[in-house]
Image (tube, rainbow, N blue to C red):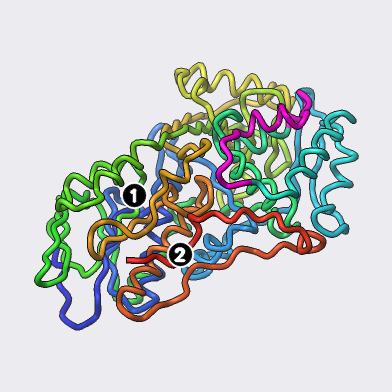
Amino acid sequence: MNGGSQSSQQTVTVLGGGVAGMSAACALAEAGFRVHLVERRGYLGGRASSYLHPGVNEVIDNCQHVLFGCCTNLIGFYRRIGVADRIHWTGEMTMIEPGGRRTRLGPSWLPAPLHGIPRLLSAHAFTLADKLALARAFSALLRPIPIDTTENLGAWLRRNGQTHGAIERFWRLVIASALNADLDTIALPYAAKVIRELFMNSAEAGSMGMSTVPLSELYAGAEQFLNQRGSEVVYNANAESAQWNEQSRQWTLVTRRGELLSDFLVPALPFEATGKLLPRLPPAEGADALMGQIRKHEHWPICSVHLWFDREITDLEHAVLLDREIHWMYNKSRLQSWRKLKGSYLELVISASRTFAARSREEAIAQALSELAEFFPRVKDATLEKAALIKEVRATFGVPPGIDAARPHAVTPWPNLFLAGDWTATGWPSTMESAARSGHLAAEVVCAQTGAPRAILSPDMKPRGLMRLVKTSVQHNSTSHHAQR
C-alpha cells in the first residue's frame, strides 16, 4: 500500500468508515484533496451498516436507522454521494396499544408549533390528563433552556407535572428511545432539542426517513464518489499507530496492511477506539486532558429482532408499540420492496435495552414474538420461518447533564490532526446527523489550515410558522465550527 502523492495535491487520511468518516472524506475529496478513507472492516457504515447474516442467509442492517427532515448535514451527505432518492419519507407515526387500537399522529394545516395539535387532541393513546400534561410541557419548552443546567429530563418531567401515561407513552417511548437512554440520565437541553426539532419547529423538520436499501448498499455511493475524484477506500486496515514528521509536515499512519503518508490525519472513530489510538500517537501537551474527556463517555445498547413469517403480518410500514418492552416495528417487506418476499420480514427495535440485551437469543426472540402478537393477531396464525437477534452494545453514547464538557472540538493537541465522530462537539445527541456534522466540521478545519476556507457544514433547518417568532434555540458553545489554533 503506497500512500505517497506524485503531485502537489494535499492528502488526508481519514480513519473510520462510519458516517463521520465518510462525510469528512467525501467533503474533502470534493474540496480537492486526495483522501484515503481507512476502514478496519471490509465494508462501510460503521454502526450504521448491513451485512449477510450467516444464520438466516439474509442481508440485514445491524439496526434500523432513521433520519429526520432536520438532519440537514446527513441529507446533504446523501445528496453529495447521489443516494438521497433511496430514502423513503413519511410525516405520520402510528402508535398501537396492546390489543390493536391505533393512534395516528402527524401534521395538520395549522402553522408550527400548532401543526401536531389536532391529531394529539384526538389521540386514543392518551387520556385528557395526559394531553393537558403534554401541552404544559411543550409550552414550557418554548422558553429557553440554560445550556449549563444540571437537571435531567426525568426530574424536569416530574417538576412539570407529567402524568404516568404521558411519561410512559410519550417521553419514555418516543424521546428516551430517540436518545437511547433512561429519562434520569438525559440532559434536559438535549431532550428539548429533540422535542423542538421533531415536533415544534415545522412539519418538514419532523418528517422521518428510512433507507429503502440495505445501509451498506446506501453507502456504496460514498466509495464511488471518492474513486471518481482520485481518492480511495482502504478496507481491512486497522490503524496501529501514527507518527508526525515535523520536517516534512506529514503523518505516517501504520496499519496492518502497510503505511500511509498524508498531510492531514482525521480520526473519525467511536470514543473508545479514539482512546486506544491516542497512546499510539506522539506525546503532546493536552493529550491527557483529551483522554480524560474520552473516559467520561458511556455507551448504551440497542437490540433488534429480525423476524421472517410465511404471511403478511401488517400493512403498516412502521409503528410505535406501547406498554411493552419492544418499542418500534419496521416492516422491511414494505420499506424494501426489492426483497420480493412471499411472506413478510419485520424488524423490532428495543432502545436503551440493557435488560433486554442481557437475555439469551432464545429468550429475547420468544419475548418479542409474544409481545408482537398482542399488537398484530396474525402472528398467532403465522409460521416463523427464521429469526435473528442483533445486540449493538455500543450503539450510542449517553448524554447526561454536563456531557458537553467531555465532547472535544475537532482541533487536537497534535498538528494537522483533527477529530470527527458523533461524540465530538456537534451540539447534537448520538445520531447519524451528529456524525455527519462532525465530519463536515473536521473537513472545514482541514480546509482552513490550507489557507482556503470552505463552508461545508449545512445550516440548521429554520423554524417555520409561528415558531419563527419564538426564541427557543439553545446556543451550544460546542456547535461553533470556527476552530482556533
Q: Front-most of 127 and 145?
A: 145
Q: Position of residue 256 (x, y in %)?
A: 15, 50
| In this picture, residue 315 sits left or right of residue 238 | right
Mark number, residue 74: none
Can I make out residue 332 in this image?
no
Q: Which residues are magenta?
A: 146-169
Q: Front-most of 97 and 363?
A: 97
Q: Position of residue 224 (x, y in %)?
A: 38, 68
For mark 1, give the secondary structure: loop
For mark 2, give the secondary structure: loop
Query: Tag 1: residue type?
Result: Leu
Q: Which residue is mark 2?
A: 481
Can I make out residue 334 in this image?
yes
Mark 1 neighbour density, 10 Å: few (under 14) some (14–19) many (20 or more): many
Query: Tag 2: residue type?
Result: His
Q: Position of residue 36 (x, y in %)?
A: 26, 65
Question: Is residue 157 one of those drawn in magenta?
Answer: yes
**Which residue corresponds to the image point at 62% horizontal and 32% vertical from the top-left?**
310
Question: Is residue 219 one of those drawn in magenta?
Answer: no
**Which residue corresponds to the image point at 61% horizontal and 23% vertical from the top-left?**
369
**Which residue corresponds to the image point at 23% horizontal and 59% vertical from the top-left?**
414
Q: Earlier in the sequence, mark 2 or mark 1?
A: 1
Q: Quadrant of residue 329?
A: top right
Total residue callouts:
2
**Which residue corresponds to the image point at 66% horizontal and 26% vertical from the top-left?**
372
Q: Position of residue 169 (x, y in %)?
A: 73, 30
Q: For the C terminus, which image quadrant?
A: bottom left
Q: Which residue is mark 1?
A: 269
